[in-house]
Image (spheres, rainbow, N blue to C red):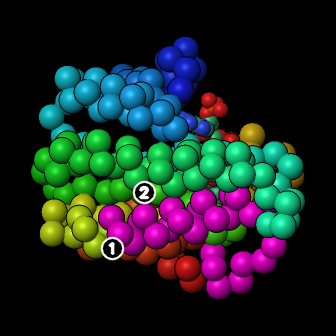
Amino acid sequence: MTARDPADAEKAATEIRQDSGNDAVEALTLDVANGASIVAAAEAFGERHDHLDVLVNNAGIFPEGETSILDVDSKALFLSLTTNTLGPLLVTRFFRPWLEKAPEGARIINLSSGLGQLYDMEDVAPTYSISKTALNAVTRQLSAALKGKNIAVNSVCPGWVRTDMGGENATRSVAEGADTVVWLASEAPQSLSGEFLRDRESIPW
Ligand SMILES: NC(=O)c1ccc[n+]([C@@H]2O[C@H](COP(=O)([O-])OP(=O)(O)OC[C@H]3O[C@@H](n4cnc5c(N)ncnc54)[C@H](OP(=O)(O)O)[C@@H]3O)[C@@H](O)[C@H]2O)c1
C-alpha cells in the first residue's frame, strides 16, 4: 500500500497489519502527481518483488469550490487531470513490467466516479468530472493495449462513500464502497476488462 507521506503510509500499513493479521503488508511512498515519485516507487517495488497481481489506482482529489464549467479554474483542472487521470496512467506504465509477470494474469482497477459518466453529465463539479471521464478513456485504452498480456483493466464507481472526500452524510460505508474493487481484485473473471462497474455490474459510460 502507498501514500504520499511516508509516515502516513507506515501508519496505515501498521493498522492494516493489526486488523487483518497479515504481516506481509508493506508501505511504499508514492505521490501519483509526481513523475519522479512514481519512478522511485516502481524501482523500490521491483527491488522487493518479482511480480504484481493487482494494481488499485485509488488516489484522487476533488478540488474545493467546484462550481460551473463557465467559471472553471485552470489550475484546479490541471491538478485534477494530473492526479486523477495522468497519475493512474503513469503508475500503470511504470509498474507494467511486474504486472506482466503476474503468473495468473494481472488486474488493474481505476477508481472513477459516476460524476464522470457522459450519458447524463450536467454542469456539476466540472474539473473532477472531466478528469474521471478522461480516466475512463484511460481504462478503455489500457484494456485494449494490454488484452494480449492477460491484464484486465476496469473502472469502478464506488458510490457515495463516507470518507474525507465523501463526508459523513454519504450513503455507503468504506466496506460497501470497496466491495466491487475487492471483487475485481479477487473473484471476478480474468476476462472481464474494459468495463465501468458499480455494485459488480456494468454501468453506462
Ligand atoms: N468518497 C466518495 O464518495 C467517492 C465517490 C466516487 C469516487 N470516489 C473516488 O474514490 C477514490 C478514493 O476516494 P476517497 O473517498 O477515499 O477520497 P479521500 O478521502 O479524499 O482520499 C483520497 C486519498 O487520495 C490520496 N491522494 C490525493 N492526491 C494524491 C497524490 N498526488 N498522490 C498520492 N495520493 C494522493 C489522499 O492522500 P492524502 O491523505 O495524502 O491527502 C487520500 O488518501 C478517489 O479516486 C475518488 O475520486 C470517491
Q: Position of residue 98 (x, y in %)?
A: 20, 42
Q: Is mark 1 within 8 Å of ligand 1?
A: no
Q: Position of residue 56 (x, y in %)?
A: 43, 48
Question: In this image, 104 relative to 119: left or right?
Answer: left
> Residue drawn at (81%, 73%), measured in percent from left and top?
123
Find disc 2 in the rendering and name its residue: 109
On-image quarter of the N terminus: top left
> Residue drawn at (59%, 62%), measured in percent from left and top?
132
Amino acid under disc 1: Leu
Question: In this image, 169 relative to 188: left or right?
Answer: right
Q: Quadrant of residue 141?
A: bottom left
Q: Nearer the viewer, residue 145 or 154?
A: 145
How would you classify the magenta stretch by its main secondary structure? helix
Per the rendered image, the range of residues in magenta is 117-142
Q: Position of residue 14 (x, y in %)?
A: 50, 19
Asked whether residue 137 is drawn in magenta, I would say yes
The numbered mark, 1 or 2, whose residue comes first in the sequence reads 2
> Residue drawn at (55%, 79%), measured in percent from left and top?
205
Q: Nearer the viewer, residue 166 or 90?
A: 90
Find disc 1 in the rendering and name its residue: 192
148 in relation to 23, above or below: below
